[in-house]
Image: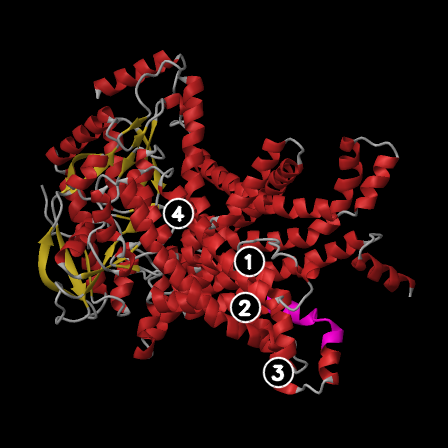
Amino acid sequence: MSSCLQTIQDYGLRAIGLGERLLPREGYTLCEHFTLIGSGMIWNIYFGVLALTTGFFLATALAVGKASPNRLVRKPAEWFIFIFRGSPLFIQFFFAYFLFLSLKSVHPVFDPFTAAWLGALIVLFFNTAAYSGEIFYGALRSIPKGDIEAADAYGFSGWSKFRKITWPTMLRLAWPAYTNEAIFLFHATTLVFFSGFPAWQQRGDALYYANYFADKTFNPFVPYPILAFYFILLTLGIIAMFGLVNRRLNRHLPAERRGKLRMRMNLIR
Amino acid sequence: MKTLILTTAALALTAGMALAQQTVRMGTEGAYPPYNFINDAGEIDGFERELGDELCTRAGLTCEWVKNDWDSIIPNLVSGNYDTIVAGMSITDERDEVIDFTQDYYPPTASAYVALSDGVDVMSAVVAAQTGTIQAGHVAESGATLVEFATPEETIAAVRNGEADAVLADRDYLVPIVEESGGELTFIGDPVPLGGGVGMGLRESDTELRDTFDAAITSMKEDGTLNELLKKWFGEDTQTY
Amino acid sequence: MFPYCTDPDTLDTFRWFSCYLTTGVHMSFYLSFLKVLALLAITAPVALGFGFLGAMAARAQFAPLSLFGKGYIAVVRGVPDIAFFLFFVIALDQAFEWSRHQILCPDWTDPIRQGSDFLVCPQAKLPLGTAPEWMHETYGFFLAVITFAIVFGAFAANVLFGAMRAVPHAQLETAAAYGMSRRQTFWRILVPQMWVYALPGLSNLWMVLIKATPLLFLLGIEDIVYWARELGGTKTSRFTDYPHGDWRMWYFLFLLVFYLAMTRISEIVLERLMRRLSHGQATSGGELLRKETTA
């Protein structure tokens, strides 16, 4: 037991470079499995949270852009969404990494972009913005006509109409689908270290370490179920948090119409 | 040799089915010139291809080449996807615990650092190495910042574009690259002796097969054919037996 | 390929490229695109089959079966797909060989796991040690297809389960009123009608399947990603007639365009299919079609 505490001290923050330098070389106890893979989750959460929060704003802009009657605004938004939704994230990671590499020789500004913490984050940011943008766009189009007419009747216009009426309604309608998007964005973060972006000093995400153990022990039956366990916890956490927001978004509705956050189609990208 | 034939025969008998002569599957990476690489025609080529074919002829075995990524090359040997690893793999104690090695067919060699300029301190710089190599292990212990890449080619690319300050790899792999770079890349520091030479990796349970290949390597060392091959692929002044 | 390719150094840019792009390695690259298409063509129906079984299980009245069906859907949904890919390929291989070992070599006394070796008797090996190389590659591909089918089967099960519940209940009640048994109602009424409800979900799934194909690379198959990385890397003139710098960005750009084209084509085809299926259906899409034709 105390040796496990020691392991946690040594490897608990290994994924961000604190603690023991060298990864375990032999033995590979269950405790080491749990600690290292859990430590890798730091990266999954980092990528997921940052991409989701930043992506949210771009997604709103993309949705409004795609719904715009102005061709000059609509076309770029449509293309952006098509490119990022129409191609595999895996290939996007590879391409972005090599693109950043060649940009590096153009200007030193691009130096940090080839590191996963920034480069992969940007790809995930664009990617989730495109997926959520499409979800928001769908919601924007299904806002009941009556809501908008009522807003007009009350004298709302321009920014305040968007801020107070259109946007909250859009969010409310889009929320169940957006929850799914969030779950799958977190799942997608596991691709980062398998797609060009190198792991510095063996600091990787949960799957990187799970794969490390599976390679060393040649027994997939221990590390991958542990990884699955962490991700199911994470998924439940996301559902709980998004459920809270959903309650707030729907608090004005009569109780019987509120309904629970229903998990619809869940798909990977 | 005789023991192998006997055991194969015994196995075939006990199994009650006449197994045709077992094909030996040779696993390699195909991305580590001049040891092994894919030529323009899409075939595996290089020092180890020629060596392996010759060894199989001498041992009277039918051999077949298989490509596998470096990072899963040991697991896939252990699980029986192929029977040998012929991929410029250095003999180390750590690997020896998991798999078995024949005697070395390439003498213990030096690894070397390559960088864009001379002024790199390899003890503190960012050093690229291929995942799961002895070089990666060495860098991790040396105090430098290790960046791992899946293929050797990517480690060089990392130095070229400034991702890493230097790369640590087998000297023989680096020599043609440095020569071709037109002065862009240079060797820095002293060569580092690592590992116990390059050998053929086999499953620990495959002792007969290991003895067969061991014998074939010995015969190639004795009649000098191995030295000729080494000179052909690594240049006249390479180390020989 | 072409007669003038014998000395690439003398060629102008255009002819150099025509030679470069037709070398043997590039042929393997083009062939790997066929692998991707084959994977799609085989996986889609198999996954649909898995999905159908999963949905039937989840609907079953027998509680453990229903629990199994729902559990299958939930677990695959909750875990990153690439973890499944990395896990299943090794696990399936070991499971197949282990069960063959139990059947074919009952007298074998050595333990199967010796240290880190996974050892079964030679007859239980998959494929047999004597098998030619193409059998090994096919077997690897087959494992990949099963893995894809297991993962995508769960998603398809989710879609079909929803579609079965979306069929108007009145239809089933009417069937019961006509004296049909549960089984008859299922096969004659529910199944034919559910497809139109399932199609949006299934087309989405198809898109996702297309985008999951590059993960073949992680399963150790020499697919387009493998070759793009291999061919795009810097080549020195000692080992090839066509030396070049780091072109990986361009190779991956090509892959990106390939996938965008696949997506676009699928979108167009699926839209047509949806129109066909909506004919005569009691849905808003069907209503729209009726108005169009009568107006």
Say above or below: A172 vs C130.
Answer: below
Q: Residues within 10 Å of mark 3 (few under 14, many from 20)?
A: few
State the residue position of label 1: A180
Q: Is residue B9 magenta?
A: no
User: Are both tags, 1 and 4, on one chain?
Assistant: yes
Write the start and end of the magenta stretch as one range: A135-147
Dots 2 and 3 on the same chain: yes
- Which element is circle 3 on? helix
Instruction: Indicate the amino acid at tag 2.
Output: Ala
Between C42 and C105, the one nearer to me in the picture: C105
Residue at the outermost front position: A255
Residue hosting label 2: A130
Disc 1 crowd rating (10 Å Cα; few below 14, some 14-19, many 20+) is many
Give the image location of residue B18, x and y in percent. Answer: 39, 16
At a point 62% along the width and 84% down the height, the residue shown is A160
Q: Where, by quadrant of the figure, is residue C204 drawn?
A: bottom right
Say yes or no: labels 3 and 4 on the same chain.
yes
Assign a secondary structure to mark 4: helix
* Vertical relation: C260 (above or below) A230: below
Q: Are marks 3 and 1 in contact (CB under 8 Å)?
A: no
Q: Amino acid at mark 3?
A: Leu
Q: CA distance from mark 3 to mark 1?
A: 31 Å
Residues at discs 2 and 4 both on one chain:
yes
